[in-house]
Image (cartoon, coloured by chain):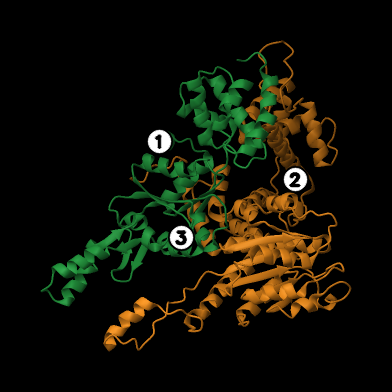
Amino acid sequence: MLAGAGYLADEPAALVSFLAQRLDKPVLVEGPAGVGKTELAKALSRASGRELIRLQCYEGLDEAKALYEWNYRKQLLRIQAGGESGWEDVHGDIFSEEFLLERPLMQAIASSEPVVLLIDEIDKTDQEFEAMLLELLSDFQITIPELGRIAAKTMPIVVLTSNNTRELTEALKRRCLYLWLDYPDLEREMEIVRLHAPELPETLARRLVEVVRMVRALDLKKPPSIAESIDWARTLLLMGAEDIDRETFERSMSIIVKHRTDIDLVAERVGVKLAEASPSGG
Amino acid sequence: MATPASPYGPRADAGPPGLAAKLLGFCEELRSEGVAVGTSEILDAFSALDEVPWTSQDDFREALAATIAKSQEDRRLFELLFERWFFRAAEAEAIERSIGEGDRRQEGGERLDIDELREQIREAIVAGNDGEMRDLARLAIAAFGRQGEGSGVVGVDVQRIRRTLGLSAGTQPAAEDGAAELPPIDREQLNRFERHLRRELERELIERTSTLPPSRPLAELDRALPTSPTQDLAAVHRAVSQMKRRLATLGHEQRGRRKGQTVDVRRTMRASLETGGVPLRLRHRPKRPRRPEIYVLCDVSTSVTSASVFFLSVLHALHDSFRKLRSFVFIERISEVTEVFEHERDFRTIAQRISSEGGVADVSGYTDYGRVWLEFLGRISDELDPRSTVIVLGDARTNGREPHAEVFAQIAERAGRLFWLNPEPKLYWNYGDSVMAAYERHCDGAFECWTTRHLESFVNVVAGGVPAGD
């Protein structure tokens, strides 16, 4: 199902996505940066034909930005415009859905079409925000003091991603299915690279993935992600390279390694190996 | 989307009788190894198993793992225990019903030509097909196991069979007839085949003797957690998250106090309108409760080696709970390690990085508390305010150097709260070169602390309402 949406999931990822839909449970996806956690949600949305609603988390994100907010200006206008009507009317009016600004979480709940809700990088938020999510994640409902409880009309597929920079609370984890995404194995990564850069010959793709895995094995600040493998594949296509030899590698290395100290380390360790491996290249 | 037909095939019938009990037993086992499996997780596991046939081992395991193991750490324990538990469960059942399979195995072994078998195994390993590998492992045991009589030690037999089959990792020697070159065998995949061999040999052993070897708790090495009998990372995290709540509420206490507030001119003028422009009532700027700021100083010198793993795990847990936390490690000099904790989750990596790039490796390796206070004060004296909490983790052994208690007093004065956690029993304080008494006077509290129980009692005392500084 996911393959059709341009995403090659491994067996656990496919199974968990399937369970998420069947059990109506949110999925918590963890893993190193750039292994396709966010992409999984996007692929789910494409595959199921549902709209994707995305909430990007950051430190200090609060309810007003994530859930809902009253549209104060509109409320003020309403009060001023309807001068002659009684307070009761106005009061009932300004706290109706018309004056509610829906933020992503609210949108996902209130949507009449089933959606995919992506809560990205949940580990960036405070624990208070996590606590606020609990009602949404377990019961798929939101309580607004003035309006009462708003329950989901349709069950959204909820995907939470985390880069594992901090331990999430037990309460949140308990409500989710857990999926650990890691770097794919050689064959799968090759398939992924070739899916995104179809013109790349197979031998070159294999070589590329092998080199990337070699780089990943080093102790780097930021190991290259799948996205970077894909970028590199496209770069190689543009450069018209036929093989990855030392020179090609050093010229295009900055695509996959993005820290000054990392670049030195990689040039030292991997560059040398390449020269030995393909002396006739170039 | 209409419910799609399950890509995992039609549902299997409800599991065989006893599956539920086995699952519960498995969860029990996980709990005993420290994985937090709640009732809700178990319920989830059962509803997940409704969707996935229990007959496919991989799907069954993944479905269970997704619902039960909620972190990488848990997942590793899960894998270890899953293998063991269900293997034992199946074998126990077999013994009980006295099901054997002795004869069938022989047949297969005789029918097969050894070269053919070798070829098949090679293919299965390269393809990475678990089911096939398992079957072939059994054939291999049947074929070779009998010839030389098993040595009785499973590990030795596994290697013997592997050698007889001529399997090794890496690129393969060219076939003798010079035909197609054989594809290389991945080390990892060869290991998998060896695991199957080992499993089947164990199975055979159990069948022969009709007894299960006793179940043991996982060895510490297998778990690879930074634990020792007194230290449990999870427990430290629990205690610290409790502490977080306590400290947060303590911070709010000061909200109502008038003392030291500034007059809000604008609001005072506005209020004066009620009284005809005469400012009768003063309005104050509300005191915003700020999040607690915490400074942790952690001794990592040799005199506290045994405790420093524990201290580092406390730091690790603190970083999970507090955003505004700055941590320092010190021996002779002080060094800030906040960054390390913010960018790294894995405890072992953190410990490694701190020891390698902490920048505290000094000439002597002896703690110099006096100098540490001076440097600490010099570095962040501007940022210390009554809202901040300073926690010192150390043994107060100065190695005979100047303790600079007056500098410490200054720190205590600037900071709202100052606590000292000492890894030594109270009995030893002030003996030898320990100058605990000199420092203790200035602390809001000094505690002995080398187990999570101590940490919890520290948290309780903090919550009990220690005066919030002066």
User: Which quadrant does the N terminus of chain B fall into?
Assistant: top left
* A33 and B29: which is toward the camera: A33
Q: Which chain letter goes with mark 2? A: B
Q: Residue B58's x, y, as percent?
A: 57, 42
Q: CA distance from mark 1 to mark 2?
A: 49 Å
Residue ranking furthest to the left: A84
- The amino acid marked with disc number 2 is Glu
Q: Please tell me whether mark 1 sits on a helix, a strand or a loop.
A: helix
Q: Which residue is mark 3?
A: A60
Q: Which residue is mark 1?
A: A5
Drawing shade for chain A: green
Residue ranking furthest to the right: B432
Do marks 2 and 3 share a subunit? no
Kindly indicate whether the residue at mark 1 contacts the one at mark 3 (C-beta within 8 angstroms): no
Kindly indicate whether the residue at mark 3 contacts the one at mark 2 (C-beta within 8 angstroms): no
Residue ranking furthest to the front: B278
Residue at (54, 58) in percent of width and height? A168
Instruction: Using the rendered image of the protein, determine whether residue B212 is visible from the camera's viewpoint.
Output: no
Drawing shade for chain B: orange
Q: Please tell me whether mark 3 sits on a helix, a strand or a loop.
A: loop
What label sits on residue B207 in the rendered view?
2
